Amino acid sequence: MDASAATPVSPPSPMKVALASFIGTTIEWYDYYIFGAATVLVLNSQFFPDLSALAGTLASFATFAVAFIARPVGGAFFGHFGDRIGRKKMLVWSVLVMGLGTLAVGLLPNYATIGVWAPVLLVICRFLQGFAVGGEWGGAVLMSLEHAPADKRAFFSSFPQAGVPAGTLLSSGAFALIALMPESALLAWGWRIPFIASALLVAVGLWIRLKVTESPEFLAIKNSDAAPQIPVWDLLKSHKRSLAHGMLCSAAPNITFYIATVFFVSYGPKELGIPSNTVFIALMIAAGVQIFALPFFARYADRHSPKRLLLIGCLLVGFGAFPVFALFNTGTFWGVLAALLLALPVLHGVSYGVISGFTAELFPTQVRYTGTSLAYQLGQIITSAPVPIVATLLIDRYHSSNGVALYMIASAALGFVGIATAPTFRRRDKIQPEPRTDSVTV
């Protein structure tokens, strides 16, 4: 046996782990969000050509929403093994499954080639993406949170959250570029490029994930033989209240995010005549600003109160819903940019950087992967999955954006209640991490 195996080593710095989580989640969310961009640009014509324009768009959005059904399944699966055998191993598998599902979308024959099997296979691929991201989010958050010092847990756990706008930036940039192609080339093969190119990013993600060390808090649980046999059973038996609050607390930022990043990409060109590239460029700028806004707000939460900041975030969404649409409805580049800067770095950003740590610390370490993943992913089914469909139907029914703005306000009220009545924010567990005595990178 290598003598170095018994040599004590220092744990990696929290910043190193947080940056690794950021890069990994950026790649995962790029894969996840290119599907959303493709949904509003080409998937209805490629996979649902026999439907009307509205029905085709709704069918594409329904396919997009399939991932939200898969996400709790992935959360339960990866959460079970993440709480039993380790966070890191599950993160490696999640990025691999996501990469395979995304690459498969880029290689799928369309409806004209294989008929009804095309949309069937598309739904399967989207399910795989949702299954992977269901396990990704909780694991990435916990790796950052559980390596962090007690007074900076919100700050470091915001880094995986920053991977969301970074992935949005990359996916929007990819589709902004291919949108410059002639329409015939775009529809024939160009839309496949961002999906196939993701294989390179996945290789980078796997390399990074394999080099990250295991969570010290999980190792403490494992060394004390306190890991549960069936984490989901323990969760449902003893932590139902935390699960319910965790499901509701992200309502306001999640609905705001999907209106800005998915619905606006369709609404702008189809209802207002705004060129798709204008929306994508504005979205890229807003997402770039948000990458830095999330840890900034999270640092404020560490110094004051995560719950207070989340409640402020809900109020901002409530008061900002109508201004976002007023700005976007101007149809100008500067109006669209102002709307997205308000929606993403501010209305979404104030809450989203803090949601991860707040949700994770509702649960003890023994069931934290399962609890965090299920709370967030089950909440996504309620808050995020219906957003493009509900918003599209509201516009079609009332021919006005007012109904969608009221939808945002309702989400803010729901989230406010869920956060205000949540249990006290748990800073540390009773079982503390033990010093590492192994040098093996697990």
Image (spheres, rainbow, N blue to C red):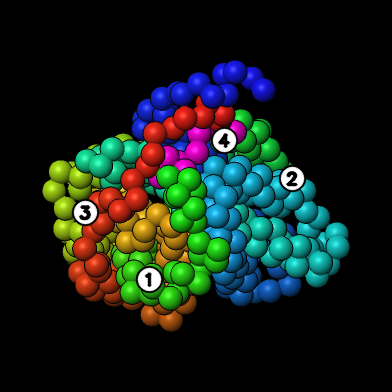
Q: Earlier in the sequence, mark 3 or mark 2?
A: 2
Q: Earlier in the sequence, mark 2 or mark 4?
A: 2
Label 3 packing within 10 angstroms: few (<14), some (14-19), many (20+): many
Cα distance, mark 2 to mark 4? 41 Å
Q: Nearer the viewer, mark 1 or mark 2?
A: 1
Q: Residue furthest bottom?
A: 397
| Residue at screen point 57% across, 50% down | 85
Cα distance, mark 1 to mark 4? 29 Å
Q: Earlier in the sequence, mark 3 or mark 1?
A: 1
Visible residue check, residue 393 = yes
- 391 or 84, nearer to the observer: 84
The residue at which mark 3 appears reads as: 306
Residue 421 vs 75, above or below: the answer is below
Cα distance, mark 3 to mark 1? 20 Å
The residue at which mark 1 appears reads as: 239
- Residue stretch rendered in magenta on the structure: 210-219
In the image, taking residue 187 as reference, residue 171 lies left or right, namely: left
Judging from the image, what secondary structure is the residue with disc 3 in? helix
Residue 106 image offset from top left, x and y in percent: 72, 48
| Residue at screen point 13% across, 48% down | 304
**Which amino acid, by three-letter code, is at mark 3?**
Pro
The residue at which mark 2 appears reads as: 189
> Which of the 4 image quarters holds residue 205?
top right
**Which amino acid, by three-letter code, is at mark 2?**
Trp
